[in-house]
Amino acid sequence: MDLLIDTYGTFIGATGERISLRFPKTTKKSKREYAARRLKKIVILRPSSISMHAVKLALEHDVDIVYLGSFGKPVGRIFSSSSRGLATLCRAQLETCTLASHNGRCATK
C-alpha cells in the first residue's frame, strides 16, 4: 500500500511497528496508524514533518519515502541502503531508462 500525505502540517511518527500520522486540529480525524510491514511507499506532497524513528522504521521494512514538489514533480527520495534496497533502485532506474530510451530521454555515453 502507498501512503499519500497531502495535508499541510501532518506529523509522521512511529508507534511500535506502526507509522502514525497526526493531522492538524482542523481535520476531523486527528490521528491514524498504519502497519509498516504493509506499506511500500510513503509519498509526501505537502509540507510535513517526519521523525527519525518513523524514517528508521520505514527503512527497516523497505518502505521508500518520496518527496514531491509542485505539480507532483519529484524532489527527493529516501530508500534503504541494504542490498535489497539498492537492487530495487537499480531495477527502477533500468526500467525508467528503458522506457525513456524510446522517447530519447535516457542519458548515454
Image: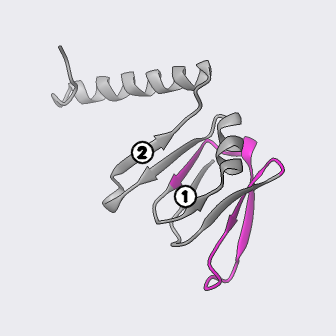
Describe the element under mark 1 as helix, strand or loop: strand
Q: Name the residue located 30 percent from the left edge and 23 percent from the top edge.
A: 98
Query: Quick one: 13 or 6, which is closer to the camera?
Result: 13
User: Closer to the camera, 91 or 99?
Assistant: 91
Above or below residue 49? Residue 106 is above
Q: Is residue 89 left or right of residue 20?
A: left
Residue shown at the point (64%, 73%) measured from the top left = 23
Where is 50 relative to 62, above or below? below
Where residue 6 appears, as percent x and y from the top left, is 50, 66
Q: Which label was assigned to residue 4? A: 1
* Residue 2 as seen in the image, left or right of residue 93: right
User: In the structure shown, which secondary structural element does the residue marked by tag 2 occupy?
Assistant: strand
Badge 2 or badge 1: first in the primary sequence = 1
Q: Looking at the picture, how far across and down is residue 54, in whole percent?
A: 68, 50
Residue that lies at the very extreme toward the right in this rendered image: 16
Q: What's the magenta region?
A: 16-43
Residue that label 2 marks: 76
> Up-down: is 64 above or below 98?
below
Q: Quadrant of residue 5?
A: bottom right
Q: Position of residue 102 (x, y in %)?
A: 20, 26
The one of 66 and 103 positioned closer to us in this rendering: 66
Q: CA distance from mark 2 to mark 1?
A: 15 Å
Outermost residue, top side: 109
Pick the residue in front: 55 or 42: 55
The amino acid pointed to by label 2 is Gly
What crowding class fits label 1: few (fewer than 14 Cα within 10 Å), some (14-19), or many (20 or more)? Answer: few
The quadrant of the picture occupied by the C terminus is top left
**Marks 2 & 1, CB-CB < 8 Å contact:** no
9 falls in the magenta region? no
Q: Is residue 60 above or below residue 54?
A: above
